[in-house]
Image (tube, helix red, strand yellow):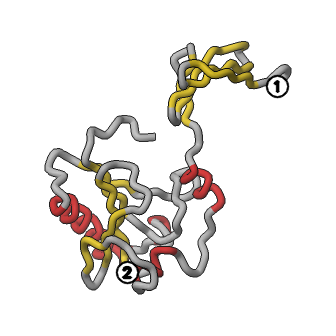
Amino acid sequence: MLGRRLFSSSFNSLTNLKQVTSYGFSASYRSKSFVYHASGRSQRFYSEEVKKAQTATQSQSTIFDKIIDKTLPANIIHEDEKCLAFHDVSPQAPIHILVIPKKRISGLPAAEASDAELLGHLLLTANSVAKKTHLERGYRVVINVGPDGCQSVYHLHIHVLGGRQLNWPPG
């Protein structure tokens, strides 16, 4: 676009931004991971996890495979013959647990009809670990799918997030 530039300057721990858009200039400021525009629109900055998701590949082995076979330590809070649940090493909420199947399924689109019982078991396990970690006031269950869904590990996993008031909309 003609004259598209981004200017920035510091303002009380926020960053003032002015950018040329197809509609002209719009004043903005950045706070944590959002840009707030004078027009009322907001835009999220990409986190490191989003950057990882954009470059992740469906490799033969994942970090979750190493946790399942115990070659990589994890703070495991549930294990049975079908799945494993453990605390996320990069929590996005005070309680952030991952529930993973022991059977390698790269993601939800790779699940088949024969996996229906396992998928149901994963959700019931998510509920069980939420109770175990005292999330009586509520929690969120998330499955990231693909690069735009922020899937950075291609082994199906369910996030259980809670321990604080979660915001809406999540994206």
In terms of image quadrants, where is residue 89?
bottom left
Q: Is residue 130 left or right of residue 22?
A: left
Tell me: 116 left or right of 27. left
In this rendered view, identify the residue nearer to me: 123 or 71.
71
Q: Give the labeled residue for mark 2.
A: 102
- Report the front residue among 124 and 11: 11
Residue extending farthest front: 12
Where is residue 58 shown, x and y percent of the image?
A: 59, 71
Q: Position of residue 68 (x, y in %)?
A: 40, 81
Give the x, y percent position of residue 102: 37, 80
User: What residue lies at 36% left-to-right and 75% top-to-bottom?
Assistant: 101
Query: Is 75 rendered above or below residue 39?
Result: below
Look at the numbered disc 2 and give the secondary structure of its residue.
loop
| 137 over 14 or under it: above or below | below
Q: x and y percent of residue 33 in the render?
A: 52, 36
What residue sits 37% from the left and 54% below the top? Answer: 142
The circle on residue 79 is none
Find out whether the residues at labels 2 and 1 contact each other: C-beta distance under 8 Å: no
Check disc 1 and report its element: helix, strand or loop: loop
| Amino acid type, callout 2 | Lys
Q: Say above or below: 96 vs 7.
A: below
Q: Which residue is mark 1?
A: 1
Q: Give left or right: position of 140 versus 32.
A: left
Sequence-first tag of 2 and 1: 1
Residue type at numbered disc 1: Met
Residue 171 left/right relative to 128? right
Q: Residue at x 31, y 52 (%)?
A: 161
As measured in the structure, the alpha-carbon distance from the residue carrying label 2 to the one carrying label 1 is 49 Å
